[in-house]
């Protein structure tokens, strides 16, 4: 494990995984609906609101708490972002690129890969009906 400024590098199972630590201000967007999914995120400190496109209020549909992942659905399914993620307070987030995530998934067994895709697809289908 090596941390240098805002870059984090972990060697595990003979592979090198790169992550980036990012600080966000209150009300700053992490990503917006319709954007390409280039990263997924782990909230280290703070809170992030997930706003669905039909939401015209300042109250998020979902709240991401510390130590929760978000932004994974677009990365797993390679589909555009279906919501906006905005920091509710100053927040610290670790990001991993789609390529890094896919490297990790490709090193797992067929049940892990299949489960991720099935769960993400089912969740996206339910949210589209909302």
Image (cartoon, rainbow, N blue to C red):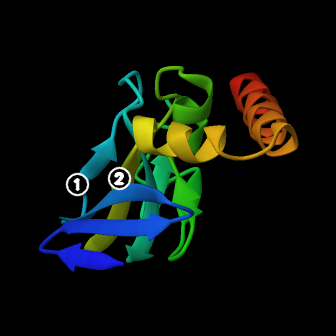
Q: Quadrant of residue 89?
A: bottom left
Q: Is residue 29 left or right of residue 101?
A: left
Residue 85 falls left or right of residue 67:
left
Q: Which secondary structure, mark 1?
A: loop
Q: Residue at x 77, y 24 (%)?
A: 129
Measured Cα–Cα span from mark 2 to mark 1? 6 Å
User: Could you say which quadrant of the image residue 63 lies in?
Assistant: bottom right
Q: Residue at x 40, y 52 (%)?
A: 58
Say which residue label 1 marks: 28
Please state the horizontal and vertical placement of residue 10, each as a whole percent of the image. Answer: 39, 68
Residue that appears at 57% across and 67% down = 68
Question: Could you tell which of marks 2 and 1 lies nearer the N-terminus?
Answer: 1
Residue 123 position within the rendered picture, expressed as x and y whole percent measured from the top left? 76, 36
Q: Nearer the viewer, residue 7 or 109?
A: 109
Residue that badge 2 annotates: 86
Q: Position of residue 47 (x, y in %)?
A: 43, 71
Residue farthest to the left, as pictured: 5
Whether the residues at callouts 2 and 1 have beta carbons within 8 Å, the answer is yes
Q: Is residue 80 visible?
A: yes
Residue 89 makes an appearance in the image = no
Q: Kindly state the secondary structure of the residue where label 2 is placed.
A: strand
Q: Residue at (62%, 25%) from the top-left corner?
A: 77
Q: Nearer the viewer, residue 11 or 105?
A: 11
Front-most of 48 and 19? 19
Image coordinates of residue 85 in percent, x first then y, are 41, 47
């Amino acid at each position: 494990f090596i941390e240098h400024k805002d870059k984090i590098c972990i060697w595990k199972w003979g592979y090198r995984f790169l992550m980036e630590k990012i600080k966000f201000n209150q009300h700053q967007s992490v990503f917006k609906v319709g954007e390409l999914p280039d990263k997924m995120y782990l909230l280290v400190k703070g809170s992030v609101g997930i706003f669905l496109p039909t939401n015209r209020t300042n109250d998020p549909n979902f709240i991401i708490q510390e130590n929760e992942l978000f932004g994974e659905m677009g990365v797993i399914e390679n589909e555009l972002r279906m919501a906006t993620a905005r920091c509710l307070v100053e927040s610290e987030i670790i990001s991993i690129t789609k390529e890094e995530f896919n490297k990790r998934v490709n090193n797992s067994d067929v049940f892990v890969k299949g489960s991720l895709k099935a769960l993400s697809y089912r969740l996206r289908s339910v949210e589209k009906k909302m």
